[in-house]
Amino acid sequence: MSGTPGGPVLVEMRALAVEGARAALLTLNRPDALNAIDWDLLHALDAALDSVAADESVRCLLVTGAGRAFSAGGDLKGYIALQRDPVRFPQFVDDLHRIFGRLRRLRVPAVALVNGVTAAGGLELLLGCDVAFAAESARIGDGHLNFGQMGGGGVLTLLPRLIGIQKAAELLFTGRFLDAAEAERYGLVSRVVADGELLGAGLEFAEQVARKSPLAVANAKEVMASIWSDALPLDAGLRFERERNAYYCLTSEDAPEGLQAFSEKRTPRFRGR
């Protein structure tokens, strides 16, 4: 632990312009350790995600880091003992997979606000999010092999799916770090903004999401993420999309409300039902 007040993960709710809607801002809070990921941070992140999942006013999750790093990855000093433990080390990796995987299963979009150094487990956290915005000063890479490690928290599976096998192999085998502009060209982040504008960009995105039906957003996220993560064949993906679309449109209150609002030239009043 770095001793920073407030615990290893800070949770802040930001009110949005849509009545009753908020964005949840989770900040990794070990700046003295470049927000290195240890068990305390994982447990705190797990608890924070519990609160986000239980709060229906939350329309978007923003994840960032305190200080000059998003996250430099695992706590390598702590790994010296942990990696020699045949019980605790696999359990730690299992917890990391489970907790990072929760980001993909949330009903709301999860956005990584990449504010600085991002490596190894930090990159795996980014890959768990639906969208990533980067500050101009961000530096993003894997780096496991630089210290005799290998990816185990999802990077070997998710990075090739996101940016392609050749670009992923180059980054993994060289341990090279991308600047923010390169990361955008690689498709690792969707947008680059000035350092002082990163949180504002995240909140602007959250505002746009909050104007949509939360039920439609949740369904669209689940379908898209499932098709991508499960690498469904084209026909299977289209079938899944078609079936979920029919179920949502035929059973929800929000789908007909959106059409009625369009016909009456007014703002929709979505209830998430």
Image: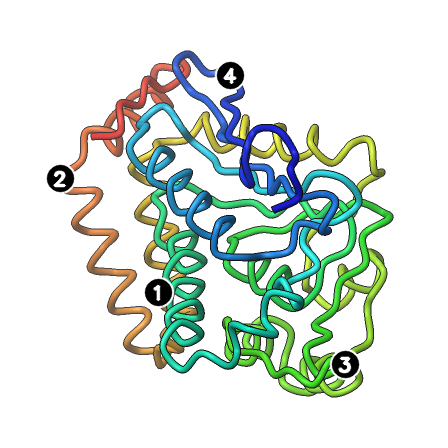
Q: Disc 3 or 4, which lies upstream in sequence?
A: 4
Name the secondary structure under disc 4: strand
Q: Which residue is mark 4?
A: 15
Q: Which residue is mark 1?
A: 226
Q: Which residue is mark 3?
A: 146
Name the secondary structure under disc 2: helix
Mark linked to residue 251: 2
Closer mark to the observer between disc 3 and disc 1:
3
Q: Which residue: 44% across, 78% down?
A: 85
Name the secondary structure under disc 3: helix
Residues packed near mark 3 inside 10 Å, few (<14), some (14 to 19) or many (20 plus): few
Type of the residue with mark 1: Ser
Type of the residue with mark 3: Asn
Residue 271, given in percent of the width and then of the height, sits at: 26, 23
Closer mark to the observer between disc 3 and disc 2:
3
* For residue 56, side relative to residue 72 (left or right): left
